[in-house]
Amino acid sequence: MLDQSGVWRFRELLPHIPNLEEHAITLREGNTPLYHLPRCARATGVENLLAKHQGMNPTASFKDTGMTFAASSAHQGKFRWVACASTGNTSASMAAYAARGNMHCLVLIPDGKISWGKLSQALDYGALTCQLRTDFDGCVRILNDLVRQKPVYLLNSVNPYRIEGQKTAAIELMEQLAWEPPDHIIVPGGNLGNSSAIGKALVEMRELKLISRLPKLSIIQAQGANPFYRCVREFGGKKLEPMTADTLATAIRIGNPASWKKALRVLQATGGEVEQVTEVEIAAAKAEIGADGIGCEPASAVTLAGLKKLRRSGFVKAGESVVLILTGHLLKDPDFTINFHRGDLFTGTTAGTAGEAEAAQAKNLQRAPVVLDADLGAVIAALDAAERSS
Ligand code: F0G
């Protein structure tokens, strides 16, 4: 059973949990596919472009790889309650693993700022879900105070076992590449746990001589939620100035990332870059990944949008190999996708007015549904029109 999990089959490379067989809570996470992105490769001029799709985990985001590990440690510690603050994916994942392990779970999420897909998961898996009238950073503050007063086990990514489990995405990636590292790995940056985990795994794999060199790990943020980008570019990594974050990629709507120091060490150790991308760039990149038949949620698409910028700046060269880490499934946030294709995504925001060239490019990618009478002639006319314009 444990060997069917893409996390636990690497357990020799992870910390030891006593009586593991009795405490492991697994949904057979990990073992996620590595896909070629041929259209995106052509569009970016990077021939060897791959996507490791962590959205193909049991609860449809990368969180499951860390959650199986941390939830198992909570079980081993005989905790009755586990808790997290979340922009949606952590809470969905925690709720599932808590349910499987017969633990109660408390979810703190920002009211109105998480996608329905993620909220619905927490509800079905039976979490006590509190929507707080604040943002993610406000939820974290309340949770940190709560754990000092109540015997609940904290399952946010400051929990070291989350990071340990999430390392396996990088280990599995190297295994899929026959231990031949790519030149670049690109990840989205929110609370910065994932980049820290992947970076830690890379450094450890090199120390163990499983790989002979380190890929450059680059971190991409949304422009409206860019405290880490500013930390590196404006303050030379000396300080992180918290901000009020805003982006339609709600998963990474985070203004005060917990793991920024770890992520900074990872950037320095691997020689990676940090970039920021606009709302329009995110939306266009998401549709492009979709057009390759793969798809992802908005936060994951910052990786492709960031790659385009890193190509323009010359940091990524045409002949180099690149792996994007797609962190969440397309179906996590269907509202974003539908609004984009209908042309409504930026209504009432300032994002739609920025960058005319990008906006035009995004428009080309829109495939709004066509409403027709139930009439064969009308459908044939739509088909012919689509054929002419293809
Ligand atoms: N992509 C997705 C889909 C996410 O859900 C998150 C974070 C990130 C990227 C950023 O990863 O925080 O490790 O830098 N989601 C958290 C949550 C914060 O609560 O679900 P990070």
Image (tube, rainbow, N blue to C red):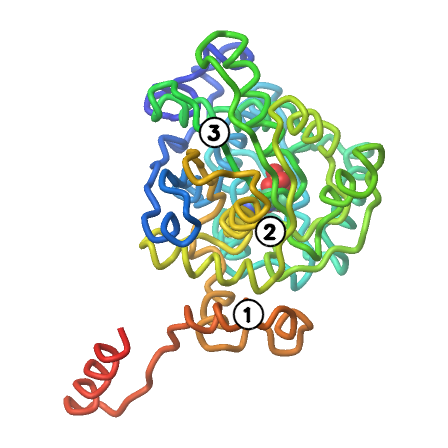
Residue, disc 1: 357
Query: Decide: marks 1, 3 in contact (CB < 8 A)?
Result: no
Q: Is 128 situated above or below 231?
A: below
Which kind of residue does numbered mark 3 sit on? Asp
The x and y percentages for residue 173 are: 41, 27
Q: Residues within 10 Å of mark 1 (few under 14, many from 20)?
A: few
Q: Is 94 rendered above or below residue 382? A: above
Name the secondary structure under disc 1: helix
Q: Which mark is residue 145?
A: none
Task: State the separation of the CA atoms marked 1 and 2.
Answer: 26 Å
Q: Which amino acid type is marked by label 2?
A: Ala
Query: Which secondary structure lies at badge 2?
Result: helix
> Which of pointers 2 and 3 indicates the residue nearer the eye?
3
Question: What x and y, as percent, mark residue 72?
Answer: 53, 24
- Quadrant where the C terminus sits is bottom left
Q: Quick one: 284 or 242, which is closer to the camera?
A: 284
Q: Which of marks 1 and 3 is nearer the N terminus?
A: 3
Whether disc 2's CB lies below 8 Å from ligand 1 is answered: yes
- Disc on the earlier residue, 1 or 2: 2
Residue 374 showing in the rendered view: yes
Residue bearing mark 2: 251
- Which three-letter amino acid code belongs to the residue tagged 1? Ala
Quarter location, residue 7: top left
Tag shown at residue 183: 3
Residue 244, image x, y percentages:
79, 55
